[in-house]
Image (cartoon, grey):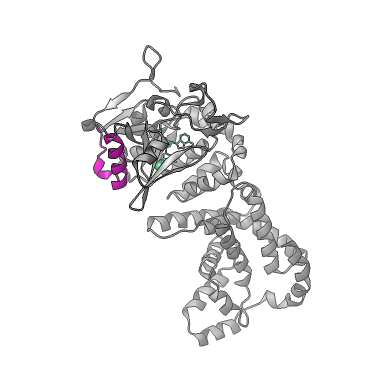
Amino acid sequence: MNNVTKSDDSGQISAVIIPRQDHPVSTSRFSEAALNVLNRLNNEGYKACLVGGAVRDLVLGREPKDFDVGTDAHPEQVRGLFRNARLIGRRFRLAHVRFRGEIIEVATFRAHHDARDDKQDAALSDEGRILRDNVYGTIEEDVIRRDFTVNALYYDIKDHSIIDFVGGMQDLELGVLRLIGDPDQRYREDPVRMLRAIRFSAKLGFTIEQASEEAITANASLLSNVPAARYFDEVLKLFLGHCALTTFEKLRHYGLFAYLFPATDTVLETEEHNFPLMLVSQALRNTDQRLAEGKHVTPAFLFAAFLWEPVRLRAAELVVNGASPIEALQIAGNQITGDQVKTIAIPKRFSYPMREIWNLQARLDRRFGKMPYKVLDHPRFRAAYDFLLLRCGAGEADQELGDWWTRFQEVSDNERQEMIKLVPSNPARGNKKRRRKKKKSSEKDA
Ligand code: ATP
Ligand code: MG
């Protein structure tokens, strides 16, 4: 049974109302901003509900990531009510209400495309993908265009009840992610729902209900039609959601990772040694750990880890053809980045530091003269050093090199001089002449 939407005799979808005393959700767990927005809409006579992930997380006793509000007020009416409201989005128009630094997303209840004759504000692609979604409707219509039953619960501020149209409460108890409606159709409408299934199953530890799961394999190829800009946001949610490693493993299990990082997937599938997998897994483990400790993580580092093996292999080819390690990494980094951004639109503010992390890997190898001091002074040194340690841990770079840099940072200036003198072998020295000769032709490529 995929579709648990309840209908009464007239074919109307009917709701189970769970009164205040029968559910664990309390407004004391709402953010001040969310409560403010809900109360204001309600006082003005609009229907106002907390919706989506916040209700799901609060029922589960988890801390919501953000608070989304659903209402029958139109975006323009919402803007009229709140001084700090801004209308955003074309594909999906909604109001952002800002309140003491927090943003509450207020979305007007929407209907499915077929529900209105006037198609002006809705559009589908040839594959059935939703391009625009601005047909307003009732709460009953709104519920069936949400993705999973557990994401389709409404907390009504008016009487503090939870409205459950699709068996979401039961699925929360069972720990099941179940698409609302026909899975094939729902994935066709929006292939990103497949990624969302993986993300929520990793985050909540839920199983994906059988029909919703089977349809993933059948529809995976639709992921190649998703615009690169949308993927960027989605990929951040996948890997910065505190369960990056599990998410990655599940994406690979379902064959979806290939649609996000094609070059990485190829090396993971074809290479005999397992250090690419070790490196990526460790980067993801570190990400989860840093986030758990409340530390900052940068997507640039993550992207650098995902793409390192394709970059390294390309650079190695270039070195065989006579390029120096430094220029080879530069060219390879540009090429692999150029290919990757066709799939995921990585903004320059991340792709630039990502390439710096790679480029510095060759410079970390040049331990003679003033070189180590220059590298140490580089603004991206810390990230590049962490990246080197990751490579050492995966067995791809020499542990001696990682240890040397660890020590180099700790010791006095005199000892640093000694350390440079004692560097065992320096391949960069021998290549010096050839490297200079090659530089001109490669500069053209870059
Ligand atoms: P998170 O904890 O990651 O914020 P969430 O469930 O709140 O999870 P959002 O992306 O914030 O996810 O979306 C809010 C709600 O909007 C979802 O719970 C779901 O009801 C609906 N929704 C979001 N994206 C889609 C989609 N692609 N298809 C259908 N419904 C969606
Ligand atoms: Mg949310």
Horizontal side of 344 relative to 136 (left or right) equals right
Q: Is residue 166 visible to us here?
A: no
The span shown in magenta is: 23-43
**Residue 401 position in % (x across, y down):** 57, 72
Q: Residue at x 43, y 60 (%)?
A: 296
Which is more toward the observer, 25 or 70?
70
Horizontal side of 35 relative to 230 (left or right) equals left
Which is more toward the observer, 61 or 395?
61
Which is more toward the observer, 140 or 146?
140
Q: Looking at the figure, which quarter contains the N terminus? A: top left
Q: Residue at x 52, y 24 (%)?
A: 118
Horizontal side of 192 relative to 329 (left or right) equals left
Q: Residue furthest left?
A: 21
Q: Is residue 400 covered in magenta?
A: no
Q: Residue at x 47, y 78 (%)?
A: 410
Is 17 placed above or below 63 here? above
Q: Residue furthest top?
A: 9
Q: Residue furthest front?
A: 80
Q: Is residue 37 visible to us here?
A: yes
Q: Is residue 40 covered in magenta?
A: yes
User: Residue 178's quadrant in the figure?
Assistant: top left
Q: Residue at x 49, y 30 (%)?
A: 212
* Number of numbered callouts drawn: 0
Is 233 placed above or below 316 here? above
**Residue 189 position in % (x across, y down):** 54, 31
Q: Main secondary structure of the magenta part?
A: helix
**Residue 355 position in % (x across, y down):** 61, 62
Is 192 placed above or below 304 here? above
User: Residue 402's quadrant in the figure?
Assistant: bottom right
**Residue 109 position in % (x across, y down):** 41, 31
Instruction: State which image quarter holds ligand 2.
Output: top left
